[in-house]
Image (cartoon, coloured by chain):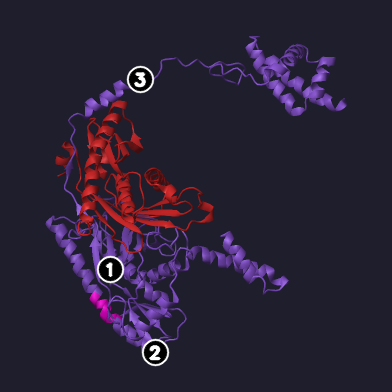
Amino acid sequence: MRRYCISLSSSSCVPHAVGNKHISCLFLIEWLLVLNSKMRETPLSNCERQFLLKAIEEKKRLDGRQTYDYRNIKIAFGTDYGCCIVDLGKTRVLAQVSCELVAPKENRPTEGIIFFNLELSPMASPAFELGRQSELLVKLNRLLERCLRNSKCIDTESLCVVSGEKVWQIRVDVHVLNHDGNIMDAASIAAITALCHFRRPDVGIQGEEVTVYSPEERDPIPLSIYHMPICVSFSFFQQGTYLLVDPSEREERVMDGLLVIAMNKHREICSIQSSGGIMLLKEQVLRCSKIASVKVSEITELINKALENDRKVRKEGGKYGFAESMPKERITALKTDVAPVEMTDIEKKAEDIISGTEPPSDSSVPSPVVRAPGTGQVGEGLENTWGLDQLEEDEEELVDQAMEEGQETEERCQSPKQGEVVVISDSEEEEVVILHQGVQVKDSNVPASSSQQQGTGVSKKKKKKKKPAQ
Amino acid sequence: MEVEEQSIIALREFGCEQNLLSRPDGSASFVQGDSSVLAGVYGPAEVKVSKEIYDRATLEVVIQPKVGLPGVRERAREQCVRETCEAALLSFLHPRSSLSLVLQVIHDDGSLLSCCLNAACMALMDAGLPMGCLFCGVTCAIDPEGRIITDPTAQQEKNSRAVMTFAIDSAQHRVMMSSTKGSFSVNELQQCIAVSQRASEKIFQFYRDSVRRRYSKTL
């Protein structure tokens, strides 16, 4: 980052007046943040950009699709209820619905709560950072909420258990696993499919008591869904001259504007959003809504078919879940059967290892010694040999002196020897001396009573006080 | 089916698909029974200055839970996986660069940490990052009767007295990482390690088979 900072400050600060420096710095920081977040995204070269635009002008797309074609949509369900993975071409999205009993909002005591959380996992693209509220993330979350919550496609009143006290909170987690363009459509398909697939536990109310039944006791209940809104994205190029359905990641990078229409199969528009600052004509919007209605009915049919298929497999007791939807014919995929593990000599081996290791040495842990009230000591520690040669004499004197002072703390007489020590040592050294003194007391097997130790402390303080006097 | 499985020591059927995502440099999904983890690897790429290490690559591991935001449990798992990967990767070959490994839990039906480790290894292999050895994860559980269960389901984990996960290297079948929960004796620990080492051979054989299959047309 520093590198960028230098190069930027030399180029961008120069044109500003000195008084504007503050503003330019702010601008610079903002710019750096943008740079930092986009640093890992591979930039699109001018050649690529021009190539893509030229191809679009000639009604050609890189992946061989026609203008109004969607990429292949694949829906796979997990073993849990309310879990699905949607593949839209190479874009892959995972949705999981979960539920929880919570207190309702105060102004709507009889309505359940629906919560959407779309996450751009750093797996999906190198530009996505963990836990960063990027503009794209906010936009997608808001669009998803508008598409599914504000269109009232889910009967929230049926989620009420006890009015004003307990309602179901339905949480929809959508994880983007691979970003190859048109996340919004994939996310909306995944979210609505997961919601249709989801079953919540049954509850029984007896008086005040609410019982939540496990799936074994009572069959879980599906949510009541009135209609299925699905987002269809249109990208515009060359100021709206050209239009493409379901843009890929490359196409999204060169587009001028984006129009997202959320619609259900009854041709009711649930939400519409135009972004990118492009002026659209009324005819264009109407044409897009017509295309959307066709796409939505196709996708709805596909979702229903996938749901029906999964229901059938579950009913018949066949195998289901992601493990089953793994392609077996690809050479990048491999599956094995249950692999038994031989257990013949495991016990012997374990015993050998244990008998082979040396048992921990049996030296008994010394019992703790209490030298003074409020202290404890385990073991004797090692003898400190630091600077003992030079200081030995002084220390001995100090010990004598300390003991003297410990016995008669009131006495403030000042021996010439003591004075010498104080003069040569500054306060830090003094502390070292005191420490040694403690060791010395221990080593010389003088019974160190608490009063004596306290005495040494006092003596130290005294010496400090005396020092400035000299 | 569950009752049958309990009496035999076995790994559930497992499978893997590599290179299934287009954006990451390496990706793999690993399935163990119903447990499933998707892994994506980016790198070696440019590293943030604050995270730069002068003599090796910086490895970041992120585990994303399926519901809600990552919490302490995910952080602990991330650390286990990161330390194992750091031990296996020859990160000194890419100094001052970043490697990031993102693991997405697709379904948790027990032995999740070992599934994460296996997915991570397959993704690193797919990314073609240099490694000193491969690694795999094996989870063992000890049920209240003291029997060892390998690769337990979520239900078996719940009923068990102790759950242990080991990361085992392919070169010498040594333990690279262990994460344990519950109480067990030294003898049981050694037995579990021995079982895991035995089970790891199956997984390494699977790695070998899948690589052989993958490159069967190019070699």
User: Residue, x 44% and y 47% (percent of image)?
Assistant: B92
Where is residue A9? Give x, y as percent. Answer: 63, 67
Q: Is residue B176 visible?
A: yes
Q: Which mark is residue A358?
A: 3
User: Residue, x 24% and y 65% (percent of image)?
Assistant: A75
Q: Quadrant of residue A404?
A: top right
Of badges 2 and 1, the one in the foreground is 2
**Chain ID at mark 3:** A
Q: Amino acid at mark 3?
A: Glu
Q: Amino acid at mark 1?
A: Ile
Query: Mark 2 to mark 1: distance in Å?
Result: 32 Å
**Chain ID at mark 1:** A
Give the answer, above or below, for where B159 lies relative to A326.
above
Query: Mark 3 to mark 2: distance in Å?
Result: 86 Å
Which residues are drawn in magenta? A292-298
For label 3, count other residues whose C-alpha is less than 10 Å away and answer few (under 14), some (14-19) or many (20+). few
- Dominant secondary structure, magenta: helix
Provide the residue designation for mark 1.
A225
From the rendered image, report the letter of the chain displayed in red: B
Q: Is residue A418 magenta?
A: no
Where is residue A304? Give x, y as percent. Answer: 21, 69
- The answer to whether marks 2 and 1 sit on the same chain is yes
From the rendered image, report the letter of the chain displayed in purple: A
Residue most extreme to the front: B219
Q: Which of disc 1 and disc 3 is earlier in sequence?
A: 1
In the picture, the quarter occupied by the C terminus of chain A is top right
Of helix, strand and loop, which one carries label 1?
loop
Q: Answer yes or no: do the residues labelled 3 and 2 have beta carbons within 8 Å?
A: no
Q: Which of disc 2 and disc 3 is earlier in sequence?
A: 2
Of badges 3 and 2, the one in the foreground is 3
In the picture, the quarter occupied by the N terminus of chain A is bottom right
Q: Determine whether, in the image, residue B197 is placed left or right of residue B59.
A: left
